[in-house]
Image (spheres, grey):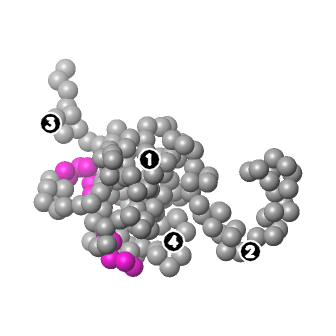
């Protein structure tokens, strides 16, 4: 950005090789808005347990969630074993269409050799390192009983169906 301010951006970019340009283009913290980055440093992620991104349509919530998940899978600070992840959307279809296959979803990110494989018959994403993300629907909360996960990405919570605890009397 300093090069741009000094009107040297084109000259600087012309000197970079393809790998440097790929890195800059794919470096989410460089392009993200502050509100799209998780609290603290990557190694400090254990200092918080919930992160709420509240924004309107097109504010970058899905991209922030997908990039957060990608950073955890790539992180040198993660457990040595594969991660177990829950992806929860308002419905199975919406979880897949938005969180996985959407314009800002997990499959849209540039993974290079770490692209996950979608096993649609099992509602499952599997990364080459063995990490797995299971898709769940908020329409069937009982599905989340039992399995243990390292983390969960919950999307579209205002559109989740009312459960007895969320229903209001009127």
Mark 4 or mark 1: which is in front? 1
Q: Earlier in the sequence, mark 2 or mark 1?
A: 2
Say which mark, if any, is on residue 111. Answer: 4
- Which residue in the structure is indicated by mark 1? 40
Q: Position of residue 28 (x, y in %)?
A: 56, 57
Q: Earlier in the sequence, mark 3 or mark 2?
A: 2
Residue at (39, 52) in percent of width and height: 44
* Residue 133 within the magenta-colored segment of the rendering: yes
Cα separation, mark 4 vs mark 1, equals 24 Å
Q: Earlier in the sequence, mark 4 or mark 2?
A: 2
Specify the segment rendered in magenta: 128-141
Residue at (77, 50) in percent of width and height: 2
Do labels 3 and 2 touch, CB within 8 Å? no
Mark 4 or mark 3: which is in front? 4
Cα separation, mark 4 vs mark 2, equals 19 Å
* Residue 122 within the magenta-colored segment of the rendering: no
Do labels 4 and 2 touch, CB within 8 Å? no
Say which mark, if any, is on residue 17. Answer: 2
Mark 3 or mark 2: which is in front? 2
């Amino acid at each position: 950005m300093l090069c741009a301010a000094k009107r040297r951006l084109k000259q600087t970019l012309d000197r970079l090789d393809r790998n440097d340009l790929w890195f800059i283009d794919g470096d989410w913290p460089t392009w993200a808005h502050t509100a799209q980055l998780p609290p603290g440093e990557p190694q400090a992620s254990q200092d918080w347990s919930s992160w709420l991104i509240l924004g309107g349509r097109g504010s970058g919530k899905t991209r922030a969630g997908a990039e957060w998940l990608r950073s955890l899978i790539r992180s040198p600070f993660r457990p040595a074993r594969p991660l177990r992840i829950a992806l929860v959307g308002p419905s199975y279809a919406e979880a897949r269409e938005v969180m996985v296959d959407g314009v800002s979803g997990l499959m849209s990110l540039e993974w290079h050799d770490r692209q996950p494989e979608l096993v649609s018959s099992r509602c499952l994403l599997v990364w080459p390192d063995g990490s797995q993300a299971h898709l769940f629907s908020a329409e069937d909360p009982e599905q989340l009983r039992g399995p243990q996960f390292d983390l969960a990405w919950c999307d579209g919570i205002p559109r989740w169906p009312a459960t007895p605890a969320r229903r209001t009397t009127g």
